[in-house]
């Protein structure tokens, strides 16, 4: 047991911002033996446990976080021992700091918080907060081991700020009940980065309801070429009739002067569509005719695209 004099010395060190010295002293103390199923926090000897409780209390953690720059070296040493209330001063500092470096450092540490912090974050999200606070809180939620039960992105997926929408979308894609609706919203969002996240997610699974949105992107003359190519790859994996029709339309160049069918003008989109067709529908009669045209092309890239999809599909078997 620590006596009055020892506690007075400890409080003086805390008041004078020497918490790091206390942590060094405690870290040098032999730890208590811990059973295999011990909780997340490292075990400590019973006689120094009150000291750890003191220096991981919210007021001390807040003191470490409010200095500019924060005492990240000490924060990192106490982080594994923080209870859920101990993380709240870090959330406060994140919302209040005007330093980008400080905010980045706090975000890196808060995404290592336990799942229990999720309920604290959702309660903060329910308030009237600036966009950047909402964005950061959503980013932290995305880094936690799991989302709080019952959490919904509905209030943020349609936020006026695209930066908030992007973080909300990442979370919505993890929630089965919200994934499809969020995906449709992302594919029609005016922010290209939202569209990219949506298309990347659709590569893994594209619901039938999303094919028309993806097709619109693949055809869109105002859509960046990178996104059009990504949309074409999604169509290639969608595997349904609407996606096939869209891809066939993309490669259709009409007829030549002999009224024979020809491919569309060479482009990144054409090459991507040929690859998608050869990997997704190698046995389809219409696709076979298109691939035969491509195989006879004088352009080596077109010829390679006509067989690259089939080669890739075989390699995955």
Image (cartoon, rainbow, N blue to C red):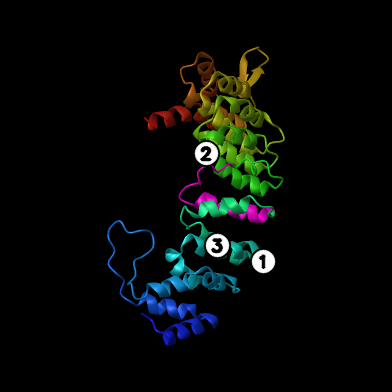
Give residue 175's mark: 2
Pointers 3 and 2 in contact (C-beta within 8 Å):
no
Q: Nearer the viewer, residue 150 or 26?
A: 150
Can the viewer see residue 299? no
| Category of crowding for the residue at label 3, using alpha-carbon neighbours closer than 10 angstroms: few (below 14), some (14–19), many (at least 20) | some
Q: Which residue is mark 1?
A: 98
Q: Magenta segment range?
A: 131-152
Query: Residue sitting at 65 percent across and 49 percent down?
Result: 163
Of the two numbered discs 3 and 2 on the same chain, state the one appearing first in sequence. 3
**For this rendering, which residue is in front, 261 or 69?**
69
217 vs 62, nearest the viewer: 62
Q: Quadrant of residue 189?
A: top right
Q: Nearer the viewer, residue 251 or 194?
A: 194
Q: Nearer the viewer, mark 3 or mark 1?
A: 3
Mark 1 or mark 2, earlier in chain: 1
Q: Which residue is depicted at the point 50% across and 30% down?
A: 304
Query: Which tag, 3 or 1, sits closer to the chain's start?
Result: 3
For label 1, the crowd category at 10 Å Cα-Cα, with few meaning under 14, some 14 to 19 and many 20 or more, is: few
Q: Is residue 225 magenta?
A: no
Mark-to-mark CA distance, 3 and 1: 18 Å
Is 4 located above or below residue 192 in the figure?
below
What element does badge 2 sit on?
loop
Above or below, 28 relative to 119: below
- Farthest residue toward the top? 259
């Amino acid at each position: 047991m620590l006596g009055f004099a020892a506690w007075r010395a400890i409080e003086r060190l805390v008041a004078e911002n020497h918490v790091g010295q206390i942590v060094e002293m405690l870290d040098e103390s032999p730890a208590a033996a811990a059973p295999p199923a011990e909780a997340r926090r490292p075990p400590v000897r019973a006689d120094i446990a009150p000291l750890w409780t003191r220096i991981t209390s919210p007021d001390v953690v807040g003191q470490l976080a409010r200095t500019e720059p924060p005492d990240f070296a000490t924060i990192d040493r106490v982080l594994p021992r923080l209870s859920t209330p101990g993380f709240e001063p870090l959330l406060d500092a994140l919302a209040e700091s005007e330093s980008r470096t400080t905010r980045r450092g706090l975000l890196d540490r808060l995404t290592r918080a336990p799942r229990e912090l999720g309920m604290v974050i959702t309660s903060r999200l329910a308030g009237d907060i600036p966009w950047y606070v909402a964005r950061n809180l959503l980013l932290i939620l995305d880094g936690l081991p799991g989302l709080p039960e019952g959490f919904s992105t509905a209030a943020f997926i349609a936020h006026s700020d695209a930066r908030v929408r992007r973080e909300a979308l990442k979370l919505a894609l993890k929630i089965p009940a919200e994934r499809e609706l969020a995906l449709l919203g992302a594919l029609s969002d005016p922010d290209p980065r939202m569209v990219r996240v949506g298309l990347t997610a659709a590569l893994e699974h594209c619901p039938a309801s999303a094919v028309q949105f993806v097709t619109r992107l693949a055809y869109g003359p105002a859509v960046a070429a990178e996104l059009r190519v990504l949309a074409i790859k999604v169509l290639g994996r969608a595997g349904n009739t609407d996606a096939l029709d869209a891809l066939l339309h993309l490669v259709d160049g009409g007829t030549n002067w002999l009224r024979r069918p020809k491919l569309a003008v060479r482009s990144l989109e054409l090459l991507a569509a040929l690859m998608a067709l050869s990997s997704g529908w190698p046995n389809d009669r219409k696709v076979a005719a298109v691939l035969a045209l491509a195989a006879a092309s004088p352009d080596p890239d077109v010829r390679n695209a006509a067989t690259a999809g089939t080669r890739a599909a075989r390699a995955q078997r």
